[in-house]
Image (cartoon, coloured by chain):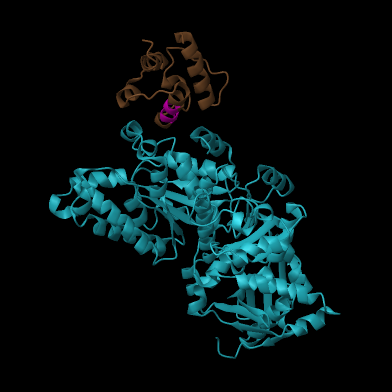
Amino acid sequence: MYTFHELKKAAKHSEAGNGMRIAVLGNCATQFFSLAIKGYAALENIPVEIFDADYNQIDAQLIDTSSEVYEFKPECIILYIATEKIYEEFLDLPLSQRSAFADDMIAKIENYWNMIAANAHSRIIQPNFTEIEDKALGQYSCKVDSTFTYQIRKLNFLLQEKASQRSDVYPVDLLALQIRLGEHFFFDGSLYYNAKMTVSMDALPYVAGAVVDVIKAMSGRIKKCIICDLDNTLWGGIIGDDGMGGIEIGELGRGHAFTDLQRYLKQLKECGIILAVCSKNNEDTAKEPFEKHEEMVLRLSDISVFVANWDDKASNIKLIQETLNIGMDSIVFLDDNPFERNLIRQMIPEIEVPELPEDPALYLEYLQEMNYFETASFTGVSSDRTSQYQAEFERKQAQKSFESIDDYLKSLEMKGSARPFEEVRFARIAQLTQRSNQFNLRTVRYTEDEIAKIASDDDHLTLYYTLEDKFGDHGLVSVVIMKKESDTTLFVDTWLMSCRVLKRGMEEFIVNKIFETARKNGFEKITAEYIPTAKNAMVKDIYRSFGFTETSENKYEIRISDYKPQEVFIKDVSDESDT
Amino acid sequence: MTREDILEQVTQIIRDEFEDDELEVSEETTAADVEDWDSLAHISLIHEVERNFDIKFTMGEIQDFRNVGEMIDSIEVHLGQA
């Protein structure tokens, strides 16, 4: 972990401007808290611009609609409500009112959230509450609702309950950090009473790290896949030498640690993380435990891409990455062997390679602590794409047997649809705007609430696209948002597409539908823009390829009457009922 | 550790804190002598001194330092040298 000293230096020397605009509001002194976040973000190459409001200004800043915080036009507001301060407020209450403390506090916090939603187009980063060992009634405090112990725990529960009902609130689990680091490490009494700062200088880098993890996820920097080695990583021993009966897995002895790791990986898969295997083994030998070993938690059906051979791991990882069509920097590679780890780090610097502890008993807690899988959305819907990736592998195999690409595309029996945004799809659409990096023309990120507003706004035309073929259903694969510039002109605000469906005519299908929709609504011209990022070079020339004229750098336009619909092998099922 | 050794280390920490390698520091130096040495910088500086000597000042000490010499007095107390 960085030291506060390093964060301070980094913050001082970081360049101002052009980053995510973040306002920090707290009920305590937040100068070092803000400084640490700024420094941490700089060291992680996340540009941020931070506005730190004065001490204890939450109410004043949020109530006044022309306050400094709103004038700053933050994309994100961090609302840091420190337990130490509300503990004092709690003790100042008459005993009779203390039982209602958590309810009153959560009402106050929801009111803050509502004011932010009304006055700023801003997301809210909301740390939860650390604990104070109050012990007014000793251990007995746990069952008396007028104690702080009881109320602060209730408050944390209410906070997560209320946050779960809103898409604009992003939690930071400060309590988990306090538990990990310990109360004495986290809080420094002399710092608090001298400077009203509630997080010790030693704990600040950890807190900043947690906040920056959330910011990273908000800007689409998330992990999507974990590639696992097998021998001594997913089970103890070497399957090729020890055989099915010899590897350690199950509830007994060392095997228990590997079983728990597998349980955790299975959960990641259920949360939408792709599992892949990369092992130096014969394929049959490597697959056998997944098929036949009774105590394996993970099964072949959990693994999206299974690569076991004797080629070098770097090539195999590249193969997996290409099959999945995701960025190398969204992959975590898990291997017990330090030699392999270093090799992969050198060959593929973008990939994340955890420095697993030597003892397998510590693998799981290490992975949990590193928090690789921060996310900014969760729908539950797209949680299992394994079969889609397995189908993609079949498609790739099938492709080899056709003479021409057109023959192959015809054989896929594709069906596509384009429909205006519907409420049941809002979450998935927002998620795609937040996660798509490569095929994304302007990389505008939207929250679910914003998508809902756009869907019902007369100045916008929206389309979401689905695609299926004989191998399986790809689900919602593309999103288009168009904004009326005038009575005759439409501007393509957002066009993104899942890279899984590249190069099979979906791009053409999408653009045909854009023009069809525009024409039906009486428009004559379409304007568009490409905003370059580090990741979206693949779509740099896409508008030109569809006949648009570049009017100035990366800005395009075309008259609708000049567009020639493209040939596609996708049957249009937009008018059929959605299943 | 002699008082001179402590002063030398404290001088280095102060120079690093204010990013000025030329800064002259003596036992008589006060916050007013150094540009940017405000209350916030003071807290950060105290933290670096504590880390460097592996000590922890009390709340009262931090408020009472009138110059570098008094800080060194406290460091000596905590190091068990006074």
Residue visible at 44% across and 9% down? Answer: B3
Q: A175 or A416, which is in the foreground?
A: A175
Measured as percent of width and height from the top left, residue A35 is found at 48, 40
Q: Is residue B22 above or below residue A32?
A: above
The shade of chain A is cyan
Quadrant housing the C terminus of chain A: bottom right
Q: Quadrant of residue A278?
A: bottom right
Q: B72 or A326, which is in the foreground?
A: A326
Measured as percent of width and height from the top left, residue A42 is found at 57, 43
The shade of chain B is brown
Measured as percent of width and height from the top left, residue A455 is found at 51, 77
Q: Is residue A441 above or below residue B74?
A: below
Q: A244 or A555, which is in the foreground?
A: A244
Q: Given the current orientation, which residue lies at the most extreme front position?
A: A245
Horizontal side of A365 relative to A507 (left or right) equals left
Q: A133 or A515, which is in the foreground?
A: A133
Measured as percent of width and height from the top left, residue A64 is found at 35, 56
Look at the image and give the residue range highlighted in magenta: B41-47
Can the viewer see residue A534?
Answer: no
Q: Given the current orientation, which residue lies at the most extreme right position?
A: A403
